[in-house]
Image: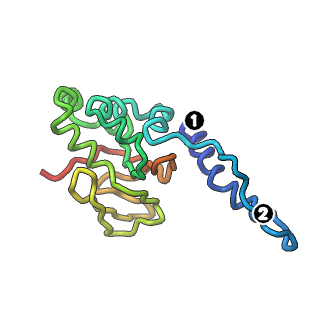
Amino acid sequence: MRRWILIAAALMLVAVPFVLAACGGEDEEAAPAPATSAPMVDDIVDTAVAAGSFVTLTAALEAAELVETLKGDGPFTVFAPTDDAFDALPEGTVDALLEDPKGDLTQILTYHVVPGKVMSTDITDGMTATTVQGEDITFTIKDGSVYVNDAMVVTADIETSNGVIHVIDSVLLPPE
């Protein structure tokens, strides 16, 4: 429920300027936007924490000392696996990764991040993008669904103050 509220709030923030522009009459001269700033949407980390379904991801980001990076200016595109996605990994995998957060855990987490802001409308079938980890991910569009490697995007385009989150249904593993 909380995720839907966040999505609805983000959509409202995006739609309001367009609605306001459409309400202006033809005879009115366009006025400059007021100098006050609208409330800023949370950053990637705060948005993930508020959603409540990324407890494992945020714990892993903390262990790997990547929280401050993803709270930075960005923009970043994060393909965020849910807690269920982490639970689907073989038993003991997450615990083993957390024991050595500067090793494989950091490699896996940075493989979920692309520099820049990649919206779902930017994605085409067969497109690739280089992750912060250094390896490429490949996008596929099947039956109207977007996949990142083999992970399906279950919720797209959650805009944040420093980028965008796409929720995925499995953990991405970099090539060996």
Q: Name the residue under label 1.
A: 1
Vertical placement of residue 125 versus 150, above or below: below
- Left or right, residue 23 beside residue 90: right
- Quadrant housing residue 171: top left
Mark 2 to mark 1: distance in Å? 38 Å
Question: Measuring 73% from the left and 61% from the top, which residue is drawn there?
Answer: 32
Q: Where is residue 160 in the image (x, y as percent from the top left)?
A: 50, 46
Camera-side residue of 119 and 151? 119
Q: How crowded is mark 2: few (under 14 residues within 10 Å), some or many (20 or more)?
A: few
Percent across and percent down for residue 142 are 38, 64
Q: As displayed, is residue 172 above or below residue 85?
A: below
Q: By what rule are the colours in the image chosen?
A: rainbow
What is the total number of numbered labels drawn onto the structure image?
2
Query: In the rendered structure, which amino acid carries the disc numbered 1?
Result: Met
Classify mark 1: helix, strand or loop.
loop
The residue positioned farthest toward the right in the image shown: 27
Q: Which residue lies furthest to the front in this view?
A: 35
Which of the two marks, 2 or 1, is nearer to us in this view?
A: 2
Q: Which numbered disc flags the more N-terminal residue, 2 or 1?
A: 1
Q: Mark 2 points at which residue?
A: 31
Question: What is the secondary structure assignment of the residue under circle 2?
Answer: loop
Amino acid under label 2? Ala
Q: Outermost residue toward the bottom?
A: 26
